Amino acid sequence: MSLDTLPLNARGKVPEWTRGCLAGPDRAPLLVVLGGISANATVAYGPQGQAGWWQSLFGLGAPLGTDKYRVLGIDFAADDGGDYAPDTKEQASIIADTLSGLDEQPLAIIGASYGGMVALAFAERFKLDTSLVIISASARPHPMSSAMRGLQRQVVALGLAHECGSQALAIARGMAMLTYRTRKEFGGRFAGGIPSGDPSAASEPCSYLKARGSAFAGAMTPGRFLSLSASIDRHSIAPEAIRCPALVIGVEEDTLVPVEDVASLAAQLGGPTQYRVIHSVYGHDAFLKEPEMLGSLIRPFLEEARTKCTAPKFEAAKP
């Protein structure tokens, strides 16, 4: 089911409407699922059956699949001109408006990476009283990660100034992927070094990053990237104000969102909180690459939440 007209409360230079997508049986428990800045509304599968970006965890037959749950995904709001970055509380208004329109309370909001930040902002601003699952996200960005993103945005801005924004965005994405993955993965996957004396020659891992960057630039505009990348760095919430039941998952090898920051978030949350740590060679990208591992942690948490849920209608509290 496609939801093409979801009103936004977000202020600034963002669209008045965004897109949502519902997948799964009508009477199944509802999950709101949010991912990184490159994610979109098509989480499990789209209206024409096209594969979603998190099909491995939420697709039909997956550990948290649409044979068991109904999954709602939402496009994030962004300024395509790249002049304004909505904060995560503004993004949270998208969820509030959508749930008010559906007149339904979700069983849980599940957010990973940037989506975890938005889920936290929603839980704080709108006093979520159902369940929250946070993967590889924290109360505020780590300074080193903010520094890396700032440099990426400078690369893109320079590219736009010289009319090569897409090429610059591809480079910035390659830089970003170095913070998503781990040395161990690259060490076991690629050979180092370059094949000649040509300074422009690319190493094997560099060629891989260039290819992934080009693919990203084909799906993301430079302005939208600037808006959402900066939105990450505007994120800040008060964990103690969030009092709903929560499952918080960190990845030991994650260098973008250090596991210490995830642990600190879990320790400060104001409600009953379970904290788990997983190990993955994929680092920050473990939420995309380790569906079985994550499913084994999230599934019992959702089953427990389901036994306690009376499925009241959602009413957005005044911010």
Image (cartoon, rainbow, N blue to C red):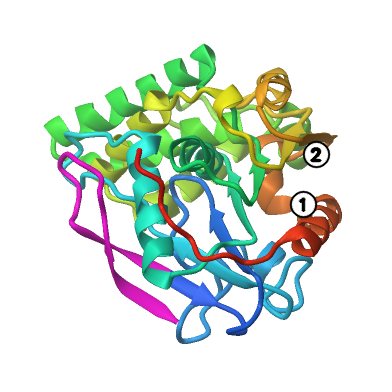
The boundaries of the magenta stretch are 1-20
Image point (64%, 68%), residue name = 55
Confirm whether the magenta stretch covers residue 292. Answer: no
Image point (62%, 84%), residue name = 25
Residue 255: image location, x then y, percent: 65, 24
Residue to which mark 2 is pinned: 280
Can you say whether 116 is above or below 182 in the image? below
Residue 219's label in the rendered image is none
Name the one closer to the observer, 116 or 198.
Answer: 116
Say which quarter of the image contains residue 312. Answer: bottom right
In this image, 125 relative to 299: left or right? left
Residue to which mark 1 is pinned: 290
Residue 265: image location, x then y, percent: 65, 24
Say which quarter of the image contains residue 47. Answer: bottom left
In this image, 74 relative to 18: left or right? right
Can you say whether 138 is above or below 286 in the image? above
> Which is nearer the N-term, disc 2 or disc 1?
2
Name the one closer to the observer, 197 or 66.
Answer: 66
Can you say whether 48 is above or below 51 in the image? below
Q: Give neighbour class at mark 1: few <14, some 14-19, many 20+ (Cα, 10 Å).
A: some
Can you say whether 242 is above or below 34 in the image? above
- Residue type, label 1: Glu
